[in-house]
Image (cartoon, rainbow, N blue to C red):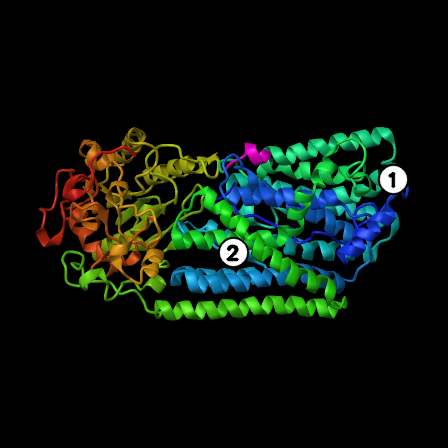
Amino acid sequence: MPTAVPPTSSSSETHTDLLPGVVRVDRNPADRRRDTVAERGRPGPRTAFRPDIEGLRGLAVLSVLAFHSAVPGLTGGYVGVDVFFVISGFLITGLLVGRPLGLGDFAARRARRILPAAATVLVATAAAGGALLDPLRGTDLARDLIAAAGQFANWRFVGEQTDYLAAGRDPSPLQHFWSLAVENQFYLLWGVLLLGLARCLHGRRRTIAITTATLAVGGLSLALCLRWTATSAPLAYFSTGSRLWEFAAGACAALAGPALAARAERRPVRRTLRVLGWGGLAAVLAPVVLYDRTTPFPGTAALLPVLGAAAVLLAGHGPLGAADAGRGPLDAGRLLAARPLRAAGRLSYAWYLWHWPVLTIAQARYGALPWTTLLALTAASALPAWLTLRLVEQPLRYGSSPAPRRGLAVGASALVIPLIAALTLGGGTVRALGDPSAAPVAAPAGAVDGPGLLAPGGRVLALTPPLARAREDFPPGQGCEIPLNADRSPRCLFGAESGSDRIVLLGDSHAGQWISAALALAEQRHWGLEVLVKPGCPLATLTVRNDVLGRTFEECDRWRENTLTRLASGPAPRLVLMAGLNRYGGPQERAEGWTRTLDRLTALGVPLAYLGDTPMPGKDIPTCLAASDGRSDACAFPRDTAFEPDPLLDGGLAARYGVRTLDLGPLLCPGTGPSCPAVLEGVVLYRDTGHITDTLARVLAPRLDKGLLGAATGPGAAVPASASVPPGASGAPSASVPASASGAPGPAQP
């Protein structure tokens, strides 16, 4: 799936104590080199250092760094995440199977290896975020710090990515910690499972049980991955359940290792393993250049890099291994054992942790940067990564007492210190933003009409809603908006229970943003309000394909059909109020799609009304206002990108089908200048990059009443599109205002 910027991972293990014939480390590097020399030339299973694994890690991290730096041609570098997961499964399984450990000892080893470097980066990111980011981003960062320190960052990002209300926010400087959380959750599960089996079973029974458990967990996880990639891409990408199969692939390579090592001296086996190594390396490299953001991921696309990485690890039991890496014909092992790749592999964990905060904070501060600058920043992040490796990772890993209690104490400190930093940062941002508990106050109904609430220079004396709440200024009844993979709306009725005395609000999330205004219209007449909305799905009959997620949303077509059938079979409402994002497809596609939908709706014989789409800022308005210290003029956005040609407002469809229309675009983007405001008369207009605040919806409720319900609207009495409220009457704009009026752009290319 990759999301807007697919997060990445680093394995938390460079070396560890493993099965005979795999790797034996978790010791001082000098001792490791002596062991390697001593082992060379010995027949049978060996316990030598595997430079190919270190090189494979280097290759994976360089792929990830290149992708995040937007290097041309390396559009699939995010598969380095999957390679890291396979390596981790391989190493940890070898450790747990090859050497008896207590659970406390295992947890202490992982804590000493993983948490100190992560805590260093978390504290540094908190300090940099507090100094360089605006208060709203600082608030988000504080929450992310808590999730990252608590090892549940992946579930925080699952919640954010599946919630359309959070759309349009910049990526978190700690978004990459999702993969570290997945790894730690895997370590906990795998440690309990394998150590439990090792304690209860022995010999062949233990081997069979561990192999069976590995295959079962891997198979179930792969099934979840395939299902969720098709139905809930963020869940598939970030969740532990959909990633366990990648660790299991590495675990299978570790479990098969001893049998291969015993046969590695046979010439046919050596040839087979050499071919396996080259084939696996090709399978790892191919997606780096063949995949891109449109590739549905992980899903079946992840099979290629995962199986490739497992093949490379498996081939290392023959000519790819340490004892033979420098001799014989050229093979993948000698390539991976090259010094530059090994150097990147040694630095990979710390470099991965540092590079993403550097990139995201720089772009949050200075805007979008060219790939050459991003690459330079990524290269520069190697310096703090090297310092972290030398001053934090290695001293705490090799220099402290091996007693489990010492390791657990180090881990506990590495959890508590970032939490303190998060609370400190969060307290500072709350003070900067003001009281977040203050409820939004609706401005007077005519407040958006004239000057009077703005101080000279464009500084807003008071913002409504306050910036601390603007992002969460949602309409009521959020359970009405169904998720992307659903195709039926629940019963969502406000107010009167009568089947016919109701308004039906119909459309996507840009219809859902008007719930409060529509509810005010209904309550004034003692009617009910039925909400039938599905985010991301147009009411116009056209199929939506998301190139970022790489799939067609057939759920939208099913939801639209189910909804129209539901309306046709139930009691007729007083009014069907349509609204939605006017950005699906091109102008001609939208016109044809609306024609097909209006044919169905007019057959209901009820009044139809259409609310034109609001201007599209294209940037996170609350964040912009927080960064500009409340200067409303600093967050204006271009008028020529704020609107798209609308077939109901501009193309005559409304008149043909008798639809009453109201365009509030000229009101929200007044005048004839080149830009549209983000704030009008103290009211923050947008809660993100495209949805209006609920405060604005309530402010504009009287205008909807005048523009859409100014005439009688009994069942079956459609109001012609030509009926309108005279401009200026009671402050209401014309009920049918073309998009080109009042300075709004006319038809243009999308």
Quadrant, the C terminus: top left
Distance in Å between CA atoms under marks 2 and 1: 44 Å
Q: Secondary structure at mark 2?
A: loop
Most prominent secondary structure in the magenta stretch? helix
Identify the residue at horizontal 20%, vertical 60% (top origin).
681
- Front-lying residue, 166 or 311: 311
Any part of residue 41 in sight: yes
Q: Is residue 412 left or right of residue 743?
A: right
Q: Residue at x 54, y 64 (%)?
A: 123
Badge 2 crowding class, 10 Å Cα cut-off, few under 14, some 14 to 19, many 20 or more, is many
Residue beneath disc 2? 174
Q: Residues within 10 Å of mark 1 (few under 14, many from 20)?
A: some
Does 544 sit left or right of 749 as displayed?
right
Tell how many labels.
2
Q: Whole-percent x and y of residue 476? A: 34, 57
**Residue drawn at (70%, 46%), measured in percent from left and top?**
54
Q: Position of residue 294 (x, y in %)?
A: 49, 36
What type is the residue that disc 2 sits on? Leu
Residue matched to label 1 = 262
Q: Which residues are magenta?
A: 287-292
Q: Quadrant of residue 715?
A: top left
Q: Nearer the viewer, residue 506 or 2?
A: 2
Residue 82 in which image quadrant:
top right
In the image, residue 375 lies in the stretch drawn in magenta: no
Looking at the rendered structure, the kind of residue marked 1 is Ala
Image coordinates for residue 468, horizontal then vertical, percent = 36, 64
Q: Position of residue 320 (x, y in %)?
A: 77, 38
Taking the image as drawn, is residue 175 in sight?
no
Secondary structure of residue under mark 1 = helix
